[in-house]
């Protein structure tokens, strides 16, 4: 058998405290399409960035075609025959296709020779692979699918035998995606090797020959695509961690606290991140939103907390109706008893250069209890902070310390303490335990349940299915911006996993 | 593991490192002096002598310092809100118009201490107004404030020239300036204070505006670090998403920050207009608006740093002028080179020495105590 196209042997990479890639072993056979699946943050992109020379691995070895290579930068990757098509295209919009393909490979200060060569090559690639594109069209005039084709042409022009595609269908319409897959299969049949990174299991089943599943920085399994099912992959992807056990009584839901009707959020490109979502959250219950990251959960939270204007939808909170297509003041919502623990604590939930006690009043800085005339009452702020530090066991217990100097788990506790101690009627909470150690997770979960038991409404968004199952009284599954199903927390992991993969009934998966 | 940005004691961060930066700046400046064939030691002595050596020189030093405190504070306030106000020069210039108009109305009617509060108001309002337009364009239209404030410097210059050769010029005068202000708009000089210390202020224009500058520095400190508004400005400066999350209006904060910033720059005009020249004249800001950027950078946008930084530039201005006068081979432009070197090393390259100093500090300290300083987890 021929040497494999790519072998990763014991690749290891850390970013500070984050172990992004743990002892990765991966073999990609020549002339195959190899899928890499995993949730956001599972380490897929890190691994591919190492292969393409953006990062250096801390340990391990890369072999291409059986030979050991040192990939110190993208040029070395190109020299080894590896080409990459990024999720976000690296194209110059006001240049033509020819100019973009030539960029970085001009060969001489005068462009004529290079342009001629690129034209000939494009013609050849078109004849050989059917990759048709007008060489003189400006990138900005091309539809997204063709822009992506230009990226592929760029890689092929540089002599790539191995193509890495990072989430290639994220920006494509279904028809364009279908087209892309035809191209990929044709390239494979002509002997190219293709690595396809995605979190969409359908795509994996449709085009790959083999698939590796990543979770928490590790490759947990590699299967021949023909010998696996969507169900198995979903389970592998989401994982079976030791089930988090949270002691809680049955919920006693009361009146509806937050009611959302027909919420639609479009991003700048007009893509529907949230698509006609309606939901109710009652007092005394935890509603969990399950879903693979990037299926509209973040936009949902932002729209409900006034951080993002929706294209359609209304919200009823504390007896008042809000038109979510108008700008809503987050401070006004806060005064009506809505608290929000944002997913992104580093940029949104905290101001890292601030002292801990200063972050303790973020969003509440205008309240009378922290004020002395126009001045902030620093004694009150510090007393308050010190009490929360004791209550939430925040370490080190120093409210004058810069927030950036606390660990991730303790930073999360600072945000939680601030938002929960306001005693809100409804708490929106995104990724409550991301990057938090096990001890703190338990503590945070107990707090959330205690709030529910005190009769508060809680809307929980998490990509950790275990967390959703452990905490929620009802689970809504979100896929492609829509709520595709509601399940009780007793629903099996496999069932939820399928819903999260966008497969609505079991038969379709078999 | 190397930690080039680990925490160092405050005396190293705010004392030793700036001092070393200054030493390097002056060493390089000394080389320049050497190249034109003069003795760096003699030049340094002349400079210090000119800035501190006698009452009149020191008076000039403090006069310049006063200007730089105001413009340094102006840049710092905007900086805390994440805005880079390059327009201090134009705001100070137009502020001079505000001070001047008020004074032209009042100087023959009331004593100076009645005029002063109105002049302060006039200078602040006109400077603020000049900053308000770029602020509004930034907040509502996204026009970059660096560009718009620079452009407003030029507009200010043209506007002032027009006014000073036209409407403000007394009939029959040949000079592009307003009429001379009379006693009702002349601030007291500090010669009495100097005399109390046995020094002679001579012809130096140092006046009570110095105290206004120091009061302004205290108020800016209070605003930025003690008030709710300052808290919101700093939140916006550090993290716009966090400001949005906290429900702070970015438009409102940008407009407020720039209003205060422009107003402070406008106050600088008190010093030349009613403290020294007693008239509104061409180029009354004389570059202080730009020096304010360097002062704010060096002073790390903190009033306690801005005052010494302003003094340093006051020394460079006054001592440099004396030096250029005493050593003909050192021209006015060479003084600008020295000032540039100070800005380069103390502002732009302020962290250059930090890893080395930090490393040396730890090596010296660790054997002595045999304990590792507790590093906070990140």
Image (tube, coloured by chain):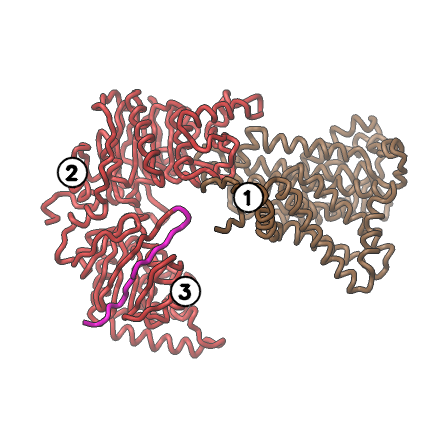
Chain colours: A red, B brown
Quarter-of-image position of residue B185: top right
Q: Which residue is found at the position 42% from the left and 36% from the top?
A: A411
Q: Secondary structure at mark 2?
A: loop
Residue B25: image location, x then y, percent: 70, 54
Q: Is residue A259 left or right of residue B221?
A: left
Q: Which mark is residue B72?
A: none
User: How far is disc 1 from disc 2 in space, using C-alphas?
Assistant: 55 Å
Residue B63 vertical position relative to residue B40 in the rendered view, above or below: above
Q: Chain of mark 2?
A: A
Q: Which of A438/B307 is in front? A: A438
Camera-side mark, 1 or 2: 2
Pair 3/1: label in front = 3
Q: Which residue is mark 1?
A: B137
Residue name at image x 71 percent, y 52 percent? B23
The answer to whether any part of residue A136 appears in the image is no
Question: Mark 1 falls on what kind of element?
Answer: helix
Disc 3 target residue: A72
Query: Where's residue A488, x and y in %?
Result: 18, 32
Q: Is residue B252 magenta?
A: no
Q: Nearer the viewer, residue B105 or A195?
A: A195
| Magenta stretch bounds | A1-17
Pinpoint the chain carrying mark 1.
Answer: B
Q: Is residue A296 visible?
A: yes
- Mark 3 vs mark 1: same chain? no
Q: Are marks 3 and 2 on the same chain?
A: yes
Marked residue nearer the N-terminal end (3 or 2): 3
Query: What residue would you read off at disc 2?
Result: A492
Q: Are marks 1 and 2 in contact (CB under 8 Å)?
A: no
């Amino acid at each position: 058998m021929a040497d494999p196209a790519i072998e990763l042997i014991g690749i290891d990479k850390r970013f500070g405290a984050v172990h992004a890639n743990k002892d990765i072993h991966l073999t990609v056979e020549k002339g195959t399409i190899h899928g890499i699946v995993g949730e956001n943050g599972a380490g897929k992109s890190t691994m591919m960035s190492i292969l393409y020379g953006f990062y250096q691995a801390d340990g391990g070895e890369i072999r291409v075609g059986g030979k050991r290579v040192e990939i110190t930068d993208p040029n070395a990757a190109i020299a080894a025959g590896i080409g990459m098509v990024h999720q976000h295209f690296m194209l110059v919009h006001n240049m033509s296709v020819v100019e973009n393909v030539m960029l970085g490979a001009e060969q001489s200060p005068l462009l004529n020779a290079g342009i001629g060569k690129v034209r000939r090559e494009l013609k050849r690639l078109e004849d050989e692979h059917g990759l048709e594109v007008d060489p003189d069209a400006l990138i900005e005039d091309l539809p997204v699918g063709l822009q992506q084709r230009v990226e592929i042409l760029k890689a092929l022009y540089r002599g790539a035998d191995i193509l890495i595609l990072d989430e290639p269908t994220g920006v494509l319409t279904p028809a364009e995606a279908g087209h892309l897959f035809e191209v990929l299969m044709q390239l494979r049949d002509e002997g190219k090797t293709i690595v396809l990174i995605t979190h969409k299991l359908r795509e994996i089943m449709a085009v790959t020959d083999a698939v590796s599943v990543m979770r928490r920085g590790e490759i947990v399994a590699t299967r021949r695509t023909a010998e696996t099912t969507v169900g198995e992959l979903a389970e592998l992807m989401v994982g079976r961690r030791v089930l988090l056990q949270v002691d809680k009584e049955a919920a006693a839901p009361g009146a509806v606290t937050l009611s959302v009707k027909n919420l639609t959020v479009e991003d700048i490109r007009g893509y529907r991140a949230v698509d006609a979502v309606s939901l109710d959250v009652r007092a005394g219950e935890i509603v969990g939103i399950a879903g693979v990251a990037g299926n509209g959960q973040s936009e949902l939270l932002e729209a409900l907390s006034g951080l993002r204007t929706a294209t359609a939808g209304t919200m009823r909170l504390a007896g008042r109706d809000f038109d979510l297509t108008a700008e809503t003041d987050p401070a006004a919502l806060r005064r009506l008893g809505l608290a929000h623990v944002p997913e992104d604590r580093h940029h949104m939930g905290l101001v890292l250069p601030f002292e801990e006690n200063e972050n303790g009043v973020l969003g509440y800085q205008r309240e009378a209890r922290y004020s002395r005339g126009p001045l902030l009452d620093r004694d009150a702020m510090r007393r308050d902070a010190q009490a929360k530090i004791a209550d939430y066991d925040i370490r080190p217990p120093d409210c004058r310390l810069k927030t950036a100097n606390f660990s991730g788990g303790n930073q999360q506790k600072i945000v939680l303490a601030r938002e929960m101690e306001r005693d809100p009627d409804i708490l929106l909470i995104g990724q409550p335990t991301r990057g938090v150690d096990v001890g703190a997770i338990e503590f945070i979960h107990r707090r959330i349940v205690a709030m529910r038991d005190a009769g508060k409404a809680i809307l929980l968004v998490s990509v950790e299915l275990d967390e959703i199952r452990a905490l929620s009284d009802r689970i809504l599954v979100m896929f492609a911006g829509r709520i595709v199903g509601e399940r009780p927390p007793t629903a099996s992991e496999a069932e939820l996993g399928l819903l999260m993969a966008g497969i609505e009934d079991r038969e379709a998966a078999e | 593991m190397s930690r080039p940005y680990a925490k160092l004691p405050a005396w190293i961060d705010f004392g030793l490192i700036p001092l070393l930066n200054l030493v390097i700046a002056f060493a390089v400046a000394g080389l320049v002096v050497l190249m034109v064939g003069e003795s760096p030691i003699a030049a340094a002595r002349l400079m210090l002598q000119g800035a501190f050596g006698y009452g009149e020189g020191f008076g000039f030093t403090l006069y310049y310092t006063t200007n730089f405190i105001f413009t340094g504070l102006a840049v710092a306030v905007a900086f805390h809100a994440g805005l880079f106000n390059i327009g201090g020069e134009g705001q100070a210039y137009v502020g001079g118009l505000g001070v001047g108009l008020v004074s032209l109305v009042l100087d023959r009617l009331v004593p100076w201490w009645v005029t002063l509060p109105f002049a302060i108001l006039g200078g602040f309002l006109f400077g603020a107004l000049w900053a308000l337009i770029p602020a509004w364009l930034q907040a509502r239209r996204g026009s970059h404030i660096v560009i718009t404030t620079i452009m407003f410097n030029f507009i200010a210059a043209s506007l002032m020239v027009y006014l000073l050769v036209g409407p403000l010029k007394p009939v029959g005068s040949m000079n592009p300036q307003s009429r001379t202000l009379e006693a009702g708009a002349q601030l007291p000089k500090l010669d009495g204070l100097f005399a109390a210390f046995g020094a002679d202020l001579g012809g130096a224009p140092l006046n009570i505006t110095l105290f206004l500058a120091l009061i302004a520095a205290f108020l800016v400190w209070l605003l930025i670090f003690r008030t709710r508004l300052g808290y919101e400005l700093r939140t916006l400066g550090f993290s716009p998403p966090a400001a949005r999350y906290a429900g702070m209006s970015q438009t409102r904060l940008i407009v407020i920050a720039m209003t205060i910033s422009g107003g402070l720059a406008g106050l600088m005009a008190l010093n030349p207009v009613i403290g020294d020249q007693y008239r509104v004249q061409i180029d009354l800001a004389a570059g202080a608006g730009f020096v304010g950027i360097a002062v704010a950078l060096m002073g790390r946008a903190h009033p306690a740093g801005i005052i010494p930084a302003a003094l340093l530039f006051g020394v460079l201005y006054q001592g440099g002028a004396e030096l250029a006068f005493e050593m003909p081979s050192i021209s006015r432009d060479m003084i600008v080179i020295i000032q540039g070197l100070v800005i380069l090393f103390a502002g732009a390259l302020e962290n250059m020495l930090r890893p080395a100093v930090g490393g040396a500090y730890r090596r010296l300290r660790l054997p002595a105590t045999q304990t590792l300083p507790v590093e906070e987890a990140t």
